[in-house]
Image (cartoon, rainbow, N blue to C red):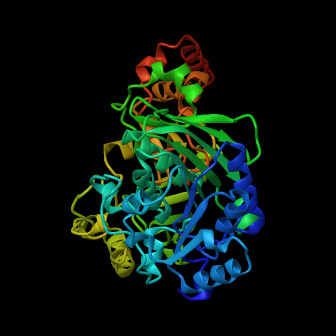
Amino acid sequence: MARGGRVEFGDFQTPPALAAEVCAALARLGVAPATVVEPTCGSGNLLLAAMDRFPDAGCLGMEIDPDHVDKLADALRGRSDAARCAIRRASFFDVDWRARLDALKEPILVLGNPPWVTNARIGALGGSNLPPKSNFQGLAGLDALTGKSNFDISEWMLIRLLEALAGRRGWLAMLCKTAVARKAMAHAWKAGMTVDWAEIRRIDAPSHFGAAVDACLLVCAVSPTGGRADCRAYDDLSSVEPAGAIGWRDGRLVADVRAYERWRRLGGGGADPWRSGVKHDRSKVMELTREPGGYRNGFGELVDLEDEYVFPMLKSSDVANGRTAAPTRRMLVPQRFVGEETATIARRAPKTWAYLSRHGEALDRRGSSIYRGRPRFSVFGVGDYTFAPWKVAISGFYKRLDFQVVGSFDGKPIVPDDTVYFLPCRHEPDARRLAGLLNSDAARGFFSAFVFWDAKRPITAELLRRLDLGALADEPVAADRAVENLNNG
């Protein structure tokens, strides 16, 4: 790996001060290992800090990069206790971690700061230090074909290490993205691994690593007989009182255990038809603004199109900020349902067909495999629901629970893009009552049990479908809020 490419490969070396703070925090938690293992030890700052904090522990560091191995070896030569630390050059993915831990004295502390990068990123950069290809997340259908099949390398590593620690006495302590920590814990709980206790302690990643991500120290205590399904969350490494707790309840990960226990009666949904907006993956071609004389696309071209396939549109920012009444953008929607033949556009709207054909090469190059084998110029997220005259919508990206009523404009239904989720409605009163229910304290309390606000897209259709709207309508306070919203409309 070239030195200049370390950041791109997720190689964020732990600063010595943070390494010392991490080990001090572990000691305060009662961590007292007989052996410390760092599976991706890099230049060794964490391992050296562990040697200082746990002077009776034997230490083992493993690292694939020869430059890092040489740097750590140089650091060890200046220590009087160097003999208790062994360094091995190896790829994490070539090691049988279960067998490796078998040979070590318990309790074992598996400590580290694995790469902060996704498998797709390493592949795109030509890297080969990757886990074996497998659908280890158990994804199905479109999820396995699109971005959801991309994952952080550290997620795969943490899961393998938790599996290797299963049934032993010890701890896992990893610096990682907070989302990765949650996924690793969810896997452990779902798989029935014995976790005595777990904590997530936030760290200042921009300050320590120059990385604009939400990151943490994940600490898990394991034993042959443990079995708690909660993970306390703390604001920093030294906090005494937890800010909350995530957990595993009724077969799913919850963001706030207390909120879930209070509002779980509203769960059991799944049948409500939450939809995402139209997915086209070519905004410069498909998204337009109306001007005298035609439509302006993202390339700055003024084009003349028939109105039949052009609809007023909303983006996430419009919905999140309540700009839903008079959209300024338009979207070209060439299909009324997924898979509809598009060749008929040539006859029905020849100027639109000519425009699409002129930009056909760009549309043909769309990277997602969902477009393969489909009619040319296909889009996704289209159906009768897309063209419903009324909708109750929410942004998937913005960090607030705020449901908006969306109607029609210029005699046409308003079409959201794929960063927006919505329920279709036939009549305005229905939409306003529904928005009132969803904006009630009861609904927000229920959703808060599941929303992880640091996620790239905190609101998803899967999250929204967890709420049983029928049960919500039976909540007196929620019903009052719905009536109030209806009257105000």
Camera-side residue: 148 or 361?
148
In the rendered image, the vertical position of residue 257 relative to residue 221, given as above or below: above
Camera-side residue: 454 or 336?
454
User: Residue 479 appears in which quarter of the rendering?
Assistant: top right
* Residue at the limit of the structure toward the top, as seen here: 476
In the rendered image, the vertical position of residue 422 relative to residue 56, given as above or below: above
Q: Residue at x 49, y 26 (%)?
A: 434
Camera-side residue: 158 or 121?
158
- Measuring from the top left, give residue 205's x and y in whole percent: 70, 61
- Measuring from the top left, give residue 271's x and y in whole percent: 33, 31
- Measuring from the top left, give residue 63's x and y in whole percent: 52, 75
Q: Residue at x 57, y 77 (%)?
A: 8
Relative to 101, 261 lies left or right: right
Q: Quadrant of the C terminus?
A: top right
- Measuring from the top left, give residue 416's x and y in whole percent: 48, 50
Q: Residue at x 64, y 66 (%)?
A: 47
User: Residue 206 appears in which quarter of the rendering?
Assistant: bottom right
In the rendered image, the vertical position of residue 34 relative to residue 44, given as above or below: above
Relative to 369, 112 lies left or right: right
Q: Residue at x 57, y 22 (%)?
A: 442
